[in-house]
Image (tube, rainbow, N blue to C red):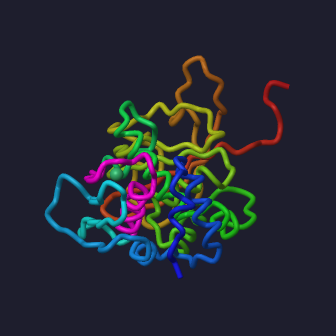
Amino acid sequence: MLTLDRVELADIHNPEALVRAIYAQKPDMPIPIPIEKIVLANDIKKVERLGDAPEFVGMLVTDETKSYGQIWVGRDMRPTRQRFTIAHEFGHFLLPHHKQMNYQCSSKDINQGEKGGTPEAEREWEANRFAAELMLPKPQFVKRLGKVAAPCLSHVQRLSTTFDMSVEATARRYLDLAGFPCCMVFSKDGIVTKHPAKSPDFTHWLCVSLNQKVPTISTAAIQGDGLDDFNEIAADEWLATDNRHVPDRIQEQTLYQEDGYAITMLWIEDTGFDEDE
Ligand SMILES: [Zn+2]
């Protein structure tokens, strides 16, 4: 049974705490998370696929007391993206301070990776945190990652299959949970398509930002196939050096996807000694 005791969840405003409370009720949730079954067991009457709606990719309609709801998702999105979007809408449904009776979420909303400047942007960010935590739950993610000595995008590929989530969503979660100082650059045909995502202990700033070209000597600049080996290049190709201490070299690894899309992981290998000594 996937039915939750919603009364117990009704006052939890923090997305991560809400998901923890859900897993406390359902500790044996199957992996990959059966999101559609979960929402249908919890007062969402219907999940419908919708085409030709360029202004939104996900929508929730509910009543004032959230006694029921209905979810629409864009049917042209990949199935993994649809799964994340359903979880995002379910977040709007369960988070008590998300009070609108109609959420129409654009692709930008589903990508809202930070608090943002408006209350609306903050709600979208919260719904994304809820979806990431629900679909890629921390304890299961860490357990299935296992003990690894160094980061590798093969872990991301493997976990994305395990959890039936997109490589991008899994890569973002990997940064948060794997414990390596890494950064992910998302590109298409050598142009950066999204704000680079960093792990909490990756303290450097990139010298390449949104809509700019990746460094010409980087593996991100070429059209490859599948998962590349690690490549070591001068760190200042990627990192901003103005008044900052940066290492000399940086490791990069690129995963080539379809249609020119690529994810490049940057990793500063801990050499085990302090250069200042
Ligand atoms: Zn939303």
Q: Choose top left, top right, bottom left or bottom right for residue 22.
A: bottom right
Residue 94 among magenta residues: yes
Q: Does 56 appear above or below 240?
A: below
Which residue sits furthest left?
A: 52
Tell me residue 239's x, y (percent).
54, 32
The segment highlighted magenta reads: 80-107
Q: Choose top left, top right, bottom left or bottom right for residue 159.
A: bottom right
Residue 186 among magenta residues: no
Residue positioned 64% across, 38% down in the render: 249
State left or right for residue 144 relative to residue 164. Answer: right
Nearer-the-camera pick, 103 or 197: 103
Nearer-the-camera pick, 182 or 233: 182
Q: How many marks?
A: 0
Residue positioned 77% across, 42% down in the render: 271
Q: Report if residue 78 is visible in the image.
A: yes
Q: Does 147 appear above or below 116?
A: below
State left or right for residue 120 relative to residue 174. Answer: left
Tell me residue 47's x, y (percent).
30, 72
Residue positioned 73% across, 62% down in the render: 148
Which residue sits furthest right?
A: 277
Quadrant containing the C terminus is: top right
Q: Does 185 appear above or below 146?
A: above
Which residue sits furthest bottom?
A: 1
Tell me residue 216's x, y (percent).
41, 42
Nearer-the-camera pick, 226 or 138: 138
Q: Does 193 appear above or below 77?
A: above
Q: Choose top left, top right, bottom left or bottom right for residue 61.
A: bottom left
State left or right for residue 246 relative to residue 69. Answer: right
Tell me residue 209's x, y (percent).
41, 35
Q: Report if residue 58 is visible in the image.
A: no
Nearer-the-camera pick, 134 or 26: 26
Residue positioned 66% across, 55% down in the render: 178
